[in-house]
Image (cartoon, rainbow, N blue to C red):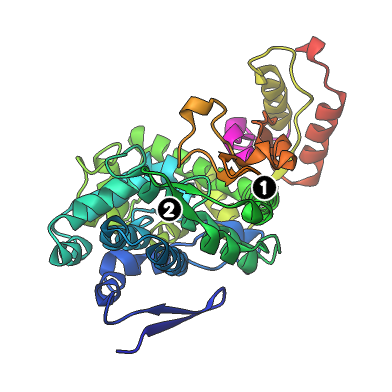
Amino acid sequence: MADKVFRDPLYNYIGIDRTRDAWLLKLLDTPEIQRLRRIHQLGVSNFTYPGAEHNRLAHTLGVVHLMQAVLDHLEKQHSDQEIQSARQPLLAAAILHDVGHGPFSHLFEPCLGIDHEQWSVAIVLDKSTRAHQILREQGAYLPNHTADLIQKDNFEHPAWQKALLSSELDVDRLDYIRRDSLFTGAGYGHFDWHRILTTLRLDGEEKRPVWPRKAAMAIEEYVYARFYMYQNVYLHKTTRGFEALLKAMWRRADELRRDGKDVTPLPALQRIWAVGKPSPETLSIQDYLAIEEFTVLGQMQAWKDHSDSILSDLARRFLTRDGLAMVEPPGQPPALHQDYSAWEAAVYQCLKRHGYEKPEWYCLKDEIKPKYRTPYRPEKDLGEQTATNTIFVEDDSGTPVEISTIMPRLRPISEVQLPRPRYYVPRESEVRRQIEKLAREWTWSQA
């Protein structure tokens, strides 16, 4: 039978073989996967890049496409049964690895106190989900094997299987970097992904993923593309400002709720709040899946008219894209632990002078985790280098080595950086000017 073909702006055509992989089409049509149409791939990056409207389902199709390609390549290279028997779980994991995402993808995880991978595993293993049922129809082993591949710290299966899906160079990253670059218009996703996929080999008895020396520059392009995407897209100051605004809004609503105030929660959110910190042990899968972006946006519409002036203002600002402005704090404080509390107290006083009675809701601190500043973080200890934490390329003698040893340009961006936090304050001209002036004139001796 002919392939089922999807038109895709990144790959033009994505095909699924109806004879060999027809079950993948059933999996794609499950309610759990179709829900991903209603979750933005890049959270609120469309506030900064208007074209960033692509969703998690489009990315999922891209990951499946690349997983098919790399498995087809490996099957030609290796005739042993292990490659062929891993095909179904790896394709299932490619489709289901993001199924546990909540509203606005990663953005809402701290709001709900969740980890999307934990929920992806729970959805795969829950017998009530259609996704689980289809996997089980293919084989009783398949739900557990798929869940093992998705689960972050599970190394139950050969490391090469995990590495194809989740490592320093995997099909997930290869798709999202190029896809996010395309839809934002940022233009950083132009690296030779085809060479990366078609030169990979599995080395030795443990089948460690290794690339030949001729693929080194393509991989270097990939690492730099990831670096530029983080610097210019994922960590963009405007995007991070709206992320901070949404988190503050949620904290304010939760604070009011805990104080006994009515925050008019929609039924889906009421069920989330009723269990405290939602987890697969405290909340049903169906109640979790009911939380979508439309749910949160509908809740914001209600909060926009709430009697609490702070909650209503934060909701209005988010819905109308009237965000807060980023202000750089003073230079690094003298203490090693980077204590900015004195500076924050001075900003609070400035806000109070301008009528903000509760300044903690209008001085939002954004601390970027150091790992997000580093696009490639190889394990430095040779004995600890694995298929998932290190990219291996053959040196001139044919020996697999960590790539930065033969591509020294990668070393500076492989070191963890400690950036200063960002602060977001009202963009109203006078108060913003006063806080910017405070930052310019600030000396840590006055703290």
What distance separates the C-alpha of mark 2 from that of mark 1? 20 Å
On the image, numbered disc 2 is attached to which residue? Answer: 164
Reply yes or no: does residue 366 show up in magenta: yes
Read off the residue under disc 1.
227
- Residue 224: x and y, percent? 69, 50
At label 1, the amino acid type is: Phe
Residue 354: image quadrant is top right
Q: Secondary structure at mark 2?
A: helix
Looking at this view, is 347 or 11 the one in front? 11
Query: In the rendered structure, which amino acid carries the disc numbered 2?
Result: Leu
Which of the pair 355/152 is nearer the observer?
Answer: 152
Label 1 sits on a secondary structure element that is helix
- Write down the region rendered in magenta: 354-374
Q: Earlier in the sequence, mark 2 or mark 1?
A: 2
Is residue 310 visible in this depiction of the protein?
Answer: yes
Which quadrant would the C terminus be assigned to in this image? top right
Check the image and name the residue furthest to the bottom: 1
When the figure is inspected, residue 122 is found, relative to residue 436, above or below; the finding is: below
Q: Verify whether residue 259 appears in magenta.
A: no
Q: Residues within 10 Å of mark 1 (few under 14, many from 20)?
A: many
Pointer 2 with pointer 1, Cβ within 8 A: no
Residue 184 in the image: state x and y as whole percent: 65, 64
When asked about the image quadrant of residue 295, the answer is bottom left
Point 36% across, 85% down: residue:
3
- Of residue 220 and residue 262, the one placed in the foreground of this image is 220
Residue situated in front as seen by the camera: 169 or 184:
169
**Which callout, 2 or 1, points to the residue nearer the camera?**
2
Q: Position of residue 372 (x, y in %)?
A: 59, 40
Residue 305 appears anywhere in the view: no
Q: State which quarter of the image contains the N terminus.
A: bottom left
Q: Which mark is residue 111?
A: none
